[in-house]
Amino acid sequence: MDKSKCEALCDLYLYTSKFAYRTIKQEEIAKALGVSQQTVSRVLKELETSGWITRDLTKDGEFIRLTPEGEAKLLEIIDEIANVITKHRTLKIKARVVSGKGEGSLYVSLPYYRESFVKYLGFEPYPGTLNAVIYDRTSMENRVLLDMYKGIEIPEKREPDRILGSVKAFPASVGGISPSALVIPSRSVHPKSVIELISPIKLRDALNLKDGDEIEVEVYV
């Protein structure tokens, strides 16, 4: 994708769309976008050559419209921007450390999950999870929001004698330690108020944590 033409198409649309059907001079566009009239003329010609706009000359001047291809390209640009914004959003969750029941250590140690975490998250986790219980409303609301985000999906695997359930994972920073991840197993026995965290290192030791200690988790969605 030609970045300069895409930016020009987006800028042109964002500025002119404010005026509906009002006639706009090139000098107005140039001033608003901080470029010369010559640049506006050149860009319009490039957009026309690309098939993204049409330019119709009449006795009242030149009328410019998006073509179907231009509309499709604009939607593509908007979608890319939305993906970038979503990708870099951060949710903060505060919770207090609790002891788990050993299930985390079991499933993280299974070859399928261990290899999947390396593949999808880029690190091999310490064989165990750090569990923490959410205690405030804002953090709980952010935890519920995670159910609305796609995250990184580790698919279900069916084996002859068992089914290894899918896992949704979100890159995270735990007490400033990254890489880490908040994982949500589809077959979890925990309520939503309990979060499970993994990292290449043992988070309890690295952060000198004991049950009841508070941690802050930044989750990247």
Image (cartoon, rainbow, N blue to C red):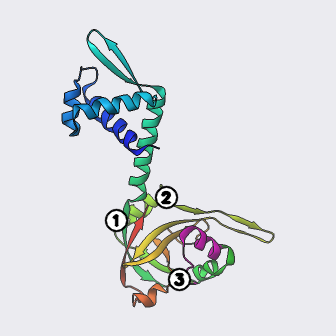
**Image quarter in which the C terminus is found:** bottom left
Residue pictured at 48% horizontal, 30% vertical: 69
Q: Which residue is mark 3?
A: 100
Helix, strand or loop at label 2? It is loop
Mark nearer the viewer, 2 or 3: 2
**Of the pair 41 and 52, the residue shown nearer to us:** 41
Residue pictured at 41% horizontal, 74% vertical: 173
Type of secondary structure dominating the magenta stretch = helix
Q: Amino acid at mark 2?
A: Asp
Mark nearer the viewer, 1 or 2: 2
Q: CA distance from mark 2 to mark 3?
A: 22 Å
How far from the left and from the top, in percent, is residue 103?
Answer: 60, 80
Is residue 150 rendered magenta in the image?
no
Image quadrant of residue 125? Answer: bottom right
Tell me whether the residue at label 2 lies in contact with that at label 3, contact meaning CB atoms closer than 8 angstroms.
Answer: no
For label 3, count other residues whose C-alpha is less than 10 Å away and answer few (under 14), some (14-19) or many (20+): some
Q: Amino acid at mark 3?
A: Gly
Q: Which residue is mark 1?
A: 137
Q: Which residues are magenta?
A: 113-127
Q: Amino acid at mark 1?
A: Arg
Q: Which residue is mark 2?
A: 147
How far from the left and from the top, in percent, is residue 197?
Answer: 49, 76
How far from the left and from the top, in percent, is residue 90?
Answer: 37, 63
How far from the left and from the top, in percent, is residue 51?
Answer: 46, 28
- N-terminal of the pair, mark 1 or mark 2, is 1
For label 2, count other residues whose C-alpha is less than 10 Å away and answer few (under 14), some (14-19) or many (20+): few
Is residue 118 rendered magenta in the image?
yes
Residue pictured at 44% horizontal, 43% vertical: 2
Residue 28 visible (yes or no)? yes
